[in-house]
Amino acid sequence: MAKIHPFKAVRPTRDKVSLVASRSYQSYTPVERDSRMDYNPYSFLHIVNPGYKYQKEISGEDRYKLVRNRYLEFKEDEIFMQDEQPCYYVYKIVNREQESFCGIIAAASTEDYENDVIKKHEDTLQHREETFKEYLKTVGFNAEPVLLTYPDDKVIAKIISQTILDRAEYEFTTTYRDTHYLWKIENQETITQLQHKFSTIETIYIADGHHRSASSNLLTKDLKENNPSHRGDEPYNFFMAYLIPESDLRIYEFNRLIKDLNGLSKEEFLIQLDEWFRIENRGIEVYKPSKPHHFSMYLDGEFYSLYLRKTTYQFTDALEELDAQVLYQTVLKPILGIKDLRVDTRIEYSHGKNDIVYVKSMVDNGDYRVGFGLFPASVQQMKKIADQGLTMPPKSTYIEPKLRSGVTIYEF
């Protein structure tokens, strides 16, 4: 049963939260990052990019120590404060499309991760896990929650709906035109009710943040081995998570862009595709898949629809039904020679919010030879794959909501 605990968040003061909150470090271009840091001394980017202060790229252990120093400076300057009592935090995002996401920020258990109460659906890279574990070990905090999803629950929904009737502790809008809200749940009776309710949930699924949760689990093992008084309730046994009901999760596809046809002519390539797909040339008509096992392809200025021949392709498990896996098994690996999706530089990915027209533009400008559009996976597909102990290929899902860093921080 899930152990989802309240915690004492370190948070920006109300007047500075909109200035502190940032997107994930990797989502900014270098120019964007420098611009924000030039004009905003409160941005969380100053903490995670400490070399900016010295106009120097710093990496490894030296960077981790400076991240820790910048973080402590934000606390000393009272940009951050810490809640006195453990709380749950209701967090709501309304994006520019007026879609609403609402869930609870809390501490999730690495023991649950280890024992598959918290289930995974994506592979992780060992070197990234180890690198981030060392980072966490030095800095001593989580600043961006792992996104977890749970089956819709009336009791939790009622607590959330009652909580958001009050004035929010935070309410701010970003330059992306997303509006963020945060409420504290500090009533002990409500905290007990929520903690008990989460404990009755048998399985919770990772939606986004597989490397972060895996690294937190490694950190627990590391610190446990070096703590002769280990009890199991120390802060390092948990990681910060944002838990939302399954109905709030939005899953988009990742489209594929390929740099060449693996030495094949256009005609030879189409003939090999015909073994697996019914192919229709749609000319300049933009085609986007409307259901599973239908794909779009853009090649030489024309769109094609590809319908999987189900008499040829066998569905042996939940993974083999996933369109990202279908494309890998029928096209990317056997025809285009892309065997390892994690390292091959001939393939690139574009998330579905960019749309198929973006794929067209990247092929038209000569950066890529062919592009494929996919139909997005469903929450049920994601759960089935996790339940069967399988893992999706890299970049199978682009999941929202995306949270800001630095709004709540979990110390261990």
Image: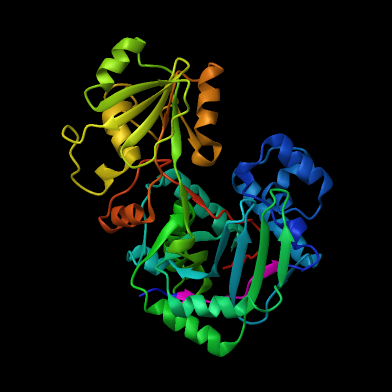
Whether residue 354 is visible, yes or no, is yes
Q: Nearer the viewer, residue 147 or 211?
A: 147
Q: Is residue 380 above or below residue 359?
A: below
Q: Is residue 135 left or right of residue 215?
A: right
Residue 9 in magenta stretch: yes
Q: Is residue 154 left or right of residue 280?
A: right
Q: Nearer the viewer, residue 389 or 227?
A: 389
Q: Is residue 252 above or below residue 230?
A: above
Q: Is residue 17 above or below residue 184?
A: above
Residue 299, given in percent of the width and then of the height, sits at: 43, 19
Q: Which residues are magenta?
A: 4-11
State how the image is colored: rainbow
Q: Nearer the viewer, residue 294 or 136?
A: 294
Residue 403 in magenta stretch: no
Please count the marks in the image.
Answer: 0
Q: Residue at x 70, y 56 (%)?
A: 21
Residue extending furthest toward the right: 39
Q: Residue at x 60, y 48 (%)?
A: 61
The quadrant in which the C terminus is found is bottom right
Q: Residue at x 54, y 41 (%)?
A: 353
The quadrant in which the N terminus is found is bottom left
Residue 219, given in percent of the width and then of the height, sits at: 47, 60
Q: Is residue 137 above or below residue 352?
A: below
The quadrant where residue 231 appears? bottom left
Q: Is residue 25 left or right of residue 284?
A: right
Residue 360, given in percent of the width and then of the height, sits at: 51, 25
Whether residue 264 is visible, yes or no, is no
The quadrant where residue 13 appears? bottom right
Q: Residue at x 57, y 76 (%)?
A: 161
Residue 267, given in percent of the width and then of the height, sits at: 32, 11
